[in-house]
Image: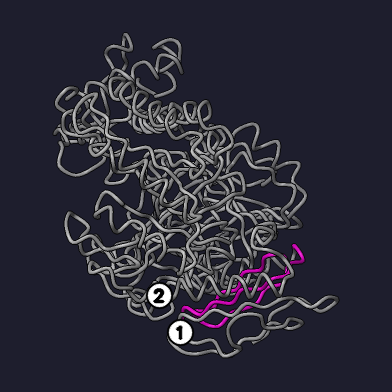
């Protein structure tokens, strides 16, 4: 449980660096990320390398005991490089070149740009790979930010044709997989295939899905190019990339296979304001603290992408500059977000940024310091967290490194699959339905029940979980099918599970496709509903409304919920259950509580805004709500905070031995 900060020494006079390092020490900062946007400072002209400033900065930070995460600068190629290789620029869906003047101005498919990245990363790794200050490397920065995964230029077309040829071998195999007999779309060779944009109407969904997969694989290859260099010259250092919130345009699990740690950049207020998932009343209630499950969802998702290891590379410290509106966080919110991350297994939380810059595109984005170098409010909250980490360390009789060994996994798993997300986004059928948001609402319901959840890939081991939820696993591979048949816990498969083949066709035996032997039912028709249409649902497990998606199912399985016409909605028995519709939040929570009961997992209907996360013998309680609440775990002693938890408050408890481990209000 360490604190860090993002620092841009190139923004400030050198005479400030020592003072900054000393100030970081006083706050309790241990890790400093630098360098990820510094290419033009390092190399202002081709081959003219200026290392003196970076040498000096690393020496200053090291002299003050600060550990450096050094970023490769490939997210911001300099102007001279773009002028030399204009084909490296990305092209948008309308065929327009996305030019120089901000950041992320490249396409992952450009071999010319990859060569330049190979060159600069190699030079950096040779120079700093064994520097005593450097303990970690960050590859690039925020892959895909500003919608830069999909690119539609000639370079991308060449890469796509090669990718298709490698996957299918023959164009006849591709034609069959894509169903190109429809609308007379057969191809005679791979060279005839174009990108799936600028078509008269919707492009073939199989075409679109393969293009998405191809672009994702370009990210994987681009990242691996850098990883291989860093492994060679800087062995033993952690390699990490910083992902983003609610971003699904590439497969983070595949990228994570080549890294040591997953990190992400968490901005709770910015995402609350801009995302359509949140209702207006939620946006108002959580205006200054963020939605209670935004951070937690991504912590658990990215911990699963990081081989069980998680860092927060950028934590919002104050108002941001990029959302539709940018309110100031509530007092205590930065502390709350920091502890929420630690409760989900984060080893380090790094604040973005050290000092607010008075120039450039992000001059209204806050830092721990104001532009005049005076401390902003978040700096004192970081100081408080640093002190509280020591308090927890003493209470647990562990040093701060040992705190990281506290178990962070839960007994409940939610499967999140990027390929399923792409499949169902390509043809959502209802504008009110989105795979990502349906997964999020299921996660939210489980959190409101006090469950600690792991978010896992479709390739993860299932053995450790008592309850497994597949929100909408569109394609069921043979490997996943076998593992689901062997799974001994309680299984819930949600609507649209098994509804597509790998090549994006409806399975011959209809949904749930390969799972029909495990779940003997057949989805005969679907009803994709607008937001304002929410038919009634009732049954042995409660009553409420369905929304967005409703399947008409034939089955002999016992029905636990039915619609107002008597059609099955939730069915199953013993260990295997199928939900054929999206449910309102209350009924969804009730149904999940019933399943948790079958899995012998205790659940608790938490007060509004309260969330609980257990990590080994530590219980973390968070209040995102608008009023103070007294909340005390039974069989535990208070370590940090108070029993009466105010808005944006945190209380941390240590379990007593041989005591009951449930929560009571």
Residue 580, quarter of the rendered image: bottom right
Q: Mark 1 — residue? A: 647
- The colour scheme used here is one colour
Residue 100, quarter of the rendered image: top left
Residue 497 image offset from top left, x and y in percent: 54, 46
Q: Residue at x 33, y 70 (%)?
A: 318
Q: Is residue 565 inside the magenta stretch?
A: no
Q: Residue at x 54, y 41 (%)?
A: 238
Residue 431, quarter of the rendered image: bottom left
Q: Is residue 244 visible?
A: yes
Magenta part of the protein: which range?
599-625
Q: Is residue 409 visible?
A: no
Residues at circles 1 and 2 in contact by the CB criterion of under 8 Å = yes
Residue 537 image offset from top left, x and y in percent: 52, 69
Q: Spot the residue most to the right.
A: 658
Residue 555 image offset from top left, x and y in percent: 63, 51
As displayed, is residue 326 above or below residue 80?
A: below
> How far is disc 1 from disc 2 in space, using C-alphas?
9 Å
Residue 545 image offset from top left, x and y in percent: 48, 70
Q: Is residue 57 left or right of residue 359?
A: right
Mark 2 packing: few (<14 Cα in 10 Å), some, or many (20+)? many
Q: Mark 2 — residue? A: 289
Q: Residue at x 36, y 31 (%)?
A: 215
Q: Which one is earlier in the sequence, the residue at label 1 or at label 2?
A: 2
């Amino acid at each position: 449980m360490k604190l860090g900060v993002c620092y841009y020494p190139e923004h400030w006079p050198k005479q400030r660096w020592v003072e900054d390092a000393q100030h970081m020490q006083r706050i309790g900062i241990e890790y400093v990320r630098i360098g990820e946007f510094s290419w033009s400072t390092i190399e202002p002209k081709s081959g003219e390398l200026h290392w003196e400033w970076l040498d000096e900065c690393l020496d200053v930070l090291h002299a003050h005991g600060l550990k450096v995460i050094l970023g490769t600068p490939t997210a911001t190629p300099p102007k001279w490089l773009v002028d030399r290789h204009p084909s490296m620029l990305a092209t948008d869906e309308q065929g327009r070149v996305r030019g120089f003047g901000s950041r992320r101005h490249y396409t992952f498919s450009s071999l010319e740009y990859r060569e330049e990245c190979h060159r600069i990363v190699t030079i950096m790794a040779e120079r700093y790979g064994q520097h005593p200050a450097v303990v970690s490397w960050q590859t690039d920065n925020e892959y895909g930010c500003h919608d830069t995964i999909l690119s539609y230029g000639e370079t991308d077309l060449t890469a796509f044709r090669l990718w298709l040829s490698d996957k299918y071998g023959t164009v006849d195999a591709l034609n069959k997989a894509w169903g190109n007999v429809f609308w007379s779309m057969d191809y005679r060779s791979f060279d005839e295939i174009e990108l799936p944009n600028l078509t008269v109407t919707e492009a073939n969904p199989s075409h679109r899905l393969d293009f998405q997969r191809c672009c994702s694989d370009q990210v994987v290859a681009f990242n691996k190019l850098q990883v291989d260099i860093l492994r060679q010259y800087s062995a033993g250092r952690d390699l990490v990339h910083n992902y983003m919130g609610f971003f699904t345009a590439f497969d983070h699990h595949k990228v994570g296979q080549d890294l040591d740690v997953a990190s992400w950049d968490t901005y709770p207020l910015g995402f609350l304001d801009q995302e359509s998932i949140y209702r207006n009343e939620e946006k108002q209630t959580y205006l200054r603290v963020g939605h209670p499950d935004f951070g937690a969802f991504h912590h658990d998702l990215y911990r699963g992408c990081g081989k069980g290891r998680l860092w927060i590379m950028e934590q919002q410290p104050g108002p941001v500059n990029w959302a539709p509106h940018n309110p100031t966080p509530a007092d205590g919110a930065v502390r709350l977000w920091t502890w929420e991350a630690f409760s989900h297994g984060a080893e380090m939380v790094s604040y973005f940024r050290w000092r607010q810059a008075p120039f450039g595109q992000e001059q209204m984005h806050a830092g721990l310091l104001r532009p005049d170098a005076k401390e902003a409010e978040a700096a004192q909250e970081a100081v408080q967290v640093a002190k509280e980490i020591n308090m927890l360390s003493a209470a647990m009789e562990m040093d701060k490194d040992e705190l990281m060994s506290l178990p962070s996994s839960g007994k409940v798993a939610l499967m999140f699959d990027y390929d399923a997300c792409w499949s169902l986004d390509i043809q959502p059928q209802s504008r009110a339905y989105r795979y990502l948001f349906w997964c999020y609402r299921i996660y939210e319901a489980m959190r409101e029940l006090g469950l600690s959840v792991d978010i896992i890939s479709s390739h993860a081991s299932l053995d450790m979980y008592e309850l497994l939820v597949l929100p909408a696993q569109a394609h069921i591979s043979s490997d996943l099918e076998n593992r689901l048949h062997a799974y001994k816990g309680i299984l819930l498969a949600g609507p649209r599970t098994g509804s597509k083949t790998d090549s994006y066709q409806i399975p011959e035996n209809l949904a749930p496709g390969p799972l029909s032997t495990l779940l003997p039912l057949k989805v005969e028709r679907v009803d994709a509903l607008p937001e304002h249409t929410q038919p009634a649902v009732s049954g042995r497990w409660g009553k409420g409304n369905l929304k967005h998606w409703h399947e008409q199912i034939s089955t002999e399985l016992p029905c636990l919920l039915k619609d107002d016409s008597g059609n099955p909605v939730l069915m199953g028995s013993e260990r295997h259950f199928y939900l054929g519709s999206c449910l309102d939040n209350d009924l969804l929570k009730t149904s999940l509580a019933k399943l948790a009961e079958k899995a012998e997992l205790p659940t608790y209907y938490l007060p509004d805004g309260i969330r609980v996360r257990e990590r080994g013998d530590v219980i973390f309680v968070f209040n995102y709500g608008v009023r103070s609440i007294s909340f005390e775990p039974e069989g535990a002693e208070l370590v940090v905070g108070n029993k009466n938890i105010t808005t944006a408050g945190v209380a941390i408890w240590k379990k007593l031995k041989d005591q009951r481990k449930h929560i009571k209000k």
